[in-house]
Amino acid sequence: MTALPAELPVLPSWDTPVVAPSLVLAPGPVPVSIYADEVWSLAPLVANPSAARPGLDWSRFPALVLPQVQLAAWMMINSSLPASVLVGHPTWHSRLGPAGIHQSVLRWQRFCVWLHRQEGGGLHAVTEEVWVSWAGHLARQPGASRGNVTKDLVALTRLWAFDAAGPAPSGMAMPPWHRLGVDDFLPRTPSAGRGENSTEVISPATMGPLLIWALRVVDDFSDDILAAWAESLRISDAAVRTPATPESKARLKSFLQDLIDRSQPVPSRSNAGCRHALANTYIAARAGCPSTQVNNLLSTEPWQHLLAYVDANPGPCPLATPITGRIDGEPWTAFIDFTETRELMRHLGTACFIVLAYLTGMRPAEVLGLQAGCCPEVASGWHLIYGREFKNAFDEDGNHHSAGRLREVPWVAIPPVVRAIRVLESLVPADRLLFDATAHTFVNAPTRSTASLRFTGLHSRIEAFAAWASGLARALGRDGEVVPDDPHGPIGLARFRRTLAWHIARRPGGLVALAIQYGHMRTTVSGGYAARGRDGIHQMLDIESARATADTLTTLHDDLARGVGISGPAARRAIHAAAQAPSFAGSIRTHRQARDILGNPALTVYDNPRSMLMCVYNRERALCHRLDADDAPRLDRCRPSCANIARTDHHAVQLLQHAQVLEKQAASEAVPDPLADRLARRAVQLRAIANCHEHDRIHQQEPTS
């Protein structure tokens, strides 16, 4: 039998704790289920503030197998997998985390329900033939993938192992795949890869406006929102603390009657029934009375008509706080309404998450695990963010640490990230999580929490933020900054990290309409805060760079095959590289595949649409690295005389189009003469480059030696 913690009995009784006290990881007090409970909470095993707190629901298990399965689950929670079971399975963990335990029991449940329908009896009746039959059933399911079926079979191996190692084994047979391997029991068609590298990037058309508004809210609107929130709390407190007196009631009647006499709108709030209701708290603060007197007044006969009047004449609840935030020199709003302060605070927290998740490359759980004080001030140099990582946090036995571990290499924070952290620190107490769940509900008196916002809730907040930002863009006449729906579905949380890598690899110099230097960030990301583990963002950057290279070569190969011409000192090297494009056509999902492409000097072709050229990179000839040598070009430093330049007919067309735009600008009377001269000279240069291309262009079929 496997070793149990000393404080647990060999055979559990009805009041035995489900989780041994020595195994409780959750910070702060947390209730521990007992063995007789119908639902066993796994929250005591969760230390990650953003992780779910699952529970094991026993109500759906057939009664005949329930005692045996419960005992196996109790063993799995409180003890390690026997060492003999781990032999030959180096990637298995001797202990599972709460999510793994929950998923395993769900897979046990599916098997037990199927077994019950087959009239197979209890676990003691499970033979090798029963296991084979169940594996075949799984493999035949529509859409069954090898990965999911493997997880099912491994989970059932754990059921057998913990049952056999427990104090009352059922005698069920060993699953045959534990002895023979799982391959013969899996569906034939391999499933597509999953994980971060197969996650769709957020469309640039969506990510650009989304980040613009997130940065605006953090940098320009946050002071206004925080001041309005403080004022709304003051008003709410005054509405509660003001004593009810005949004088305060008289002030209330006078305030409302004056509005009615002048046919003015009455401060109101939206109501769930699509009607407008009185903004009781705001009115109480304006009139100098408690909010209870507003409610009581409505119940008196002379004032029962007030609701109908308010429904026909709804008015705003403007706060007196000044608006300091500007967009192109104009206030972003005329005022902040008392009824929208809580929503704006949620949008402010969401904007901070977007800035952190996108501009640091952190995983969502790493962002949600940050605490106040994680980014101390520095006298000079870069700010650093100290936090925990969860995905690759394992103990000496290879088991996952729910609490994560302190990251050895801190993240580097650029100024917008530091600003977002400072805003978040103003929302939570000094020792709390930056995304503390209760603090971010924005109620008047939040209770203390050890959990952060959950993924599902934050997912909804991001969608709500995008909708709010789009509404504000339309209201301000900035239709080009509306956040369109992403073609691949909801924005979610995990896509920010991959999108950052995509933009750095494919849009050097900065695409997202901001003054963020992605060319410089490439060095910062991979050198300053890339993880040392195998899943660091530097590997994702390599994969995205390799994909960009493959796409560039595939496009060039197709263009050359259609007769498109190419010129420049590196034209023949580009033709040679494009000829190899079919050999690596297809998806690039692994870091090894990426390094094979990036490490091949014959394939180093980079498109640079901003400079209207391609770079066929050879670091010995590169002018973008004069004092240093690098394996990749600095596309924001392209020099016209560089020997690595090549241009196609498409680039020549772009040169002529841009020259035409410059010529029109130079001819405008609104442009000063010195600037017009510079624009005209630049247009002449672009036309000369296009003419040289037309004269020197070669084609793929021409000899290359």
Image (tube, rainbow, N blue to C red):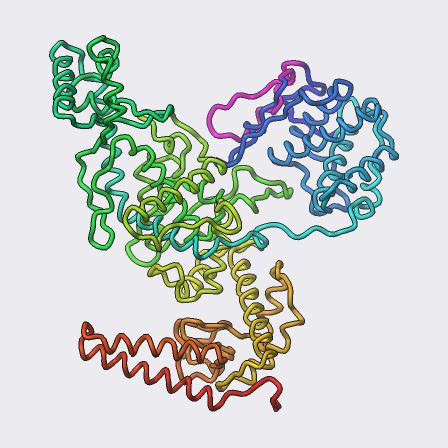
Instruction: Please tell me whether residue 418 is drawn above or below residue 437 in the rendered image.
Output: below
Name the side, left or right, on which 112 lies relative to 636.
right
Which x, y percent locates residue 694? 46, 87
Q: What is the count of numbered marks?
A: 0
Instruction: Please tell me whether residue 408 is drawn above or below residue 585 in the rendered image.
Output: above
Q: Main secondary structure of the magenta part?
A: loop
Query: Residue placed at 62% from the left, 59% from the top?
Result: 590
**Is-magenta flag for residue 21?**
yes
Instruction: Please tell me whether residue 49 is drawn above or below residue 205 in the rendered image.
Output: above
Which x, y percent locates residue 693? 46, 86
Give the quadrant of residue 323: top left
Near-viewer residue (385 or 569): 569
Near-viewer residue (90 or 7): 90
Name the side, left or right, on which 207 lies relative to 548.
left
Q: Does any portion of residue 408 appear in the rendered image? A: no
Which x, y percent locates residue 395? 59, 42
Give the residues in magenta. Answer: 14-37
Q: Quadrant of the C terminus?
A: bottom right
Which x, y percent locates residue 206? 43, 53
Q: Quadrant of the N terminus?
A: top right
**Is-magenta flag for residue 586?**
no
Name the side, left or right, on which 319 lies relative to 502.
left
Query: Residue placed at 38% from the left, 35% from the top?
Result: 432
Q: Does any portion of residue 457 appear in the rendered image? A: yes
Query: Residue placed at 81% from the left, 44% from the top?
Result: 185
Query: Residue placed at 60% from the left, 33% from the top?
Result: 98
